[in-house]
Amino acid sequence: MKDLSARILNMAQMRGASYCDVRVVNRITQMLAVKNGRVQELTQSESQGYGVRVIADGAWGFAASSRDDFADVDATVNRALQIARASALTKSRNVNLGAPEVNKGTYRSAYKMDPFMISMSDKINLLLKADEAMRGVKKNGAHLVTTAELVFVREDKSFASSEGALIQQENIESGCELQVFATDEAGDVQSRTYPWGRHQQTRGFEFVLEQQLVENAPRIAEEAIMLLTADVCPAYDATTVILSGNQVALQVHESCGHPIELDRVLKQEASFAGTSFLTLDKLNNLQYGSELVNITADATIPGGLGTFGYDDEGVPAQRAEIVRDGRFVGYMTNRELAAELNLGRSNGTMRAENWNRTPLIRMTNINLLPGTWKLDELIADTDDGIYFDTNRSWSIDDKRLNFQFGTELAWEIKGGRKTRLLKNPIYTGVTPNFWRSCDAICDESEWVVWGTPRCGKGQPPQTIRTGHGASPARFRNVKVFSKS
Amino acid sequence: MLGYEKLKQLADTALTHSKADQTEIVLQTVDSSLSRFANNTIHQNVFESNATARVRVILGKRTGVAASNDLSAEGIARTVKMARAIAQAQTESPANAPLPESAPAPRVDAFVQRTADCSPETRAHLISRLCKQAASQKLIAAGAFRTDAYEIAVANSLGAFQFHQGTVADLHTVVMNEAGTASGYASASSPDVRAVDGDAVTRTAIDKALRSQNPIALAPGEYTVILEPAAVAMMLQYLAWHTFNALAVQEERSFVRGKRGELLFSPLVNLYDDGAALDGFPSPFDHEGVPRQRVAMIENGVARDVVYDTFTARRDNVQSTGHSLPAPNVQGPLARNLFLAAGDKALAEMIGSVQRGILITRFWYTRVVAPLNVMMTGLTRDGTFLIENGQLSLPVKNLRFTTSYIEALKNIGAVGRDTQLVRDEWFGMNFRAPAVMVERFNFTGVT
């Protein structure tokens, strides 16, 4: 690994690169899925290769290959340089990375039980039991489709740069998901998932065991069946809503995490992911949320899906303030854009999906810091409102302002109590107005670092794994309606 | 790119190594180049060369799958061994066996050498020209220009060996004003890079951007809309996932379940999937090596067939239509080469027939609200214009819609005569579609 990187760095510099970095990655992914009582998918895939990023003639080039014989390495380095020089044909200025990052170090995810050392049989049995527990509930005429999934990832990654950085990281991820679809004769389709779609962390098999899949399986199946006969969520032009912790996580991801990506702000993602309403003039000047709202980008939280030792530019993982007492105070940055805008050192958010993708500014763990409320006290404090639980549908505009989110279920709150189950609930709003209406956030006892393993961005497409620490929170004057 | 002979040799090696009852290997290679631009300069410019092997083995009624991009002899042997070990850990299931038998797929010429050879300098020159034209109008351009060459081979121990190679050229751009308050989108896709007309894409995007300045806000409500091909393609994508596949029908979540043969949609609608069509991105067989059949989903508004893979076909005691994703999987089959047949109306004619409505260039961030009737929410983006008295008038601020795509297919009042090939790079789906006029399209919010 070290030899390959050194060879590539030498070649690139000898041939005119003013900067070069090399990532060598080996990634193993294990997927297990049980559907309707049978093992539907059992796959282990391995992907290894290296990506070479260079600056030549003041512009970027990137080439990646899965083959590391001498001829291929030679061709890949040449390709990266050729691409960089082609990029230079349209450049308006030379790339400047700011001060060198010459970090040397190692990092390993903090896990207790290596998921790849747990037998396939044990994993399959866990899924079969959870699936059986979902299918074993009283169906009341409903038709059920049940799925139980596990995913495990091991990633060994080295990073070396022409500035002298040399980093080795071993990341482990474990994820799980239960899903049940319930349908009735009238054609209604209701779904429930647990923990919330696929939940994932940079931890070992202990994470899966902690989720208590078998114990929670009957509950979500019963809830999906109950939803078939539940009342449709009423419509309100303005009402009080309480979001479950996982729905707050989704809300943070879409309406805070994406708009603080500095590449989006600078229109670098305009052709696909879009831009951002958090333009440069808003930094330190915008009241993004109420004074209760404090948000960080923190790649150092133990177990978070956006937790690592160093980003893919070799910058150490950091905790950056994004929103302080409601005021917008920071972006996620990389070396080039931090230097261009004099924002100091990059806060270390450059991440690539795998060896074959160039790193982009991506979310790490974007967290709404906990408040002071207990959830039962918060509900008791709410006279009239709706409790939204577990995301089902999510959509937000290309500047990250106008959003519409639906959840799997909701509870009507009357007089400080959950009174009736509601189906097909949707709420909608505009990002800063919504966050400014936040008047209560639950405390550490409800705070979970939710994993979002399928965040898409970039061209060619990249899916990255992000985390969101969140607890339930209350918002006032929110528009609510139903799909029906 | 490894070529037919090398891929055949690798497949034979895997099949020889395997001592399983049945073995399948899917080999895929890609040389992919993409130049990405924003703010009128190239800011990301990448190349990837990769080759993968996915091995499925069947031991009695147990199945195991392993994949790797180590295609050395040792790597292939290790992948076969891993697949076998996984199968041995499986529980028995009668649905796991056997592999499908399949006839040789038709050879479809989808490989264009000049696309495979397209250099970063060629892409940079086209992008430079595009950006200069945008800059000359005080606009900024973003976008991507991709040129790929790929191969796929599927072999199994029943004697099948299918091979296909192709190329992709895809250019798209969003041109916008400095403030980001007006933008226009255009794209072009073809297996042949020469067929990608950069100047035409540039002209369309610039024209839309210039016309999008100072948009007005329209009140939410029902409008007649004209959807351009990029918007139609996004609609077809969700109909493929949620309606016109056998798994959705079997799981009782497809709108056409129990309704095939009924007039469910506008008689103007003819929708089919055709992996061999030369005016798409041909893909003559699926990931199980089964030749793709042409599947008519809607004929003159009547719901007809859905696509099958081997697993869902056995359940219904029919033949696979050749629409399997890598098997086995929980997603089911998927139509990936969708065609909405052309009608007889020029775009100007359709616009001319609308008293008050909205022209939509494309959708953004569409998501399912309810799967059965494909109730969707999403937004308009990069070129939304009011139509008044049969003419395009003012630009419109982007709108959020919440509407059923099933209802939209029912409410199609006109179909364009010109079609465009649209490629979805996230899911590898391809669409050839005209513009359509849809009545009573429901908008629920304004940005």
Image (cartoon, rainbow, N blue to C red):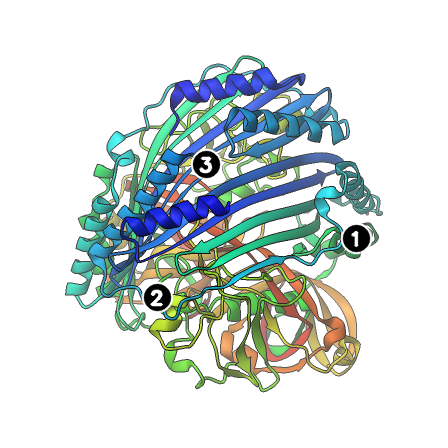
Can you name the residue that lies furthest to the top here? Answer: B159
Residue B367 position (above or below residue A142):
below
Quadrant of res B196: top left
Please give the name of the residue rendered at 48% of the width and 17% of the height, measured from the top-left corner.
B161
Q: Amino acid at mark 3?
A: Arg
Q: Is residue A204 visible?
A: yes
State the residue position of label 1.
A209
Read off the residue under disc 2.
Answer: A267
Cα separation, mark 2 vs mark 3, equals 31 Å
Identity, as a three-letter code, of the amino acid under mark 1? Leu
Is A329 displayed left or right of B98 in the figure?
Answer: left
Residue that numbered label 3 is attached to = B336
State the separation of the CA atoms marked 1 and 3. Answer: 38 Å
Q: Is residue B171 above or below residue A257?
A: above
Q: Say which chain tag 2 marks.
A: A
**A399 versus B50 height, above or below:** below
User: Relative to the observer, which residue lies in front, A446 or B46?
Assistant: B46
Answer with the quarter of the image where residue B166 lies.
top left
Do the dots labelled 2 and 3 sit on one chain?
Answer: no
Q: How many other residues sit within 10 Å of disc 2, few (<14), some (14-19) or many (≥20)?
A: many
Instruction: Give the alpha-carbon distance from disc 2 to disc 1, as whole Å.
Output: 43 Å
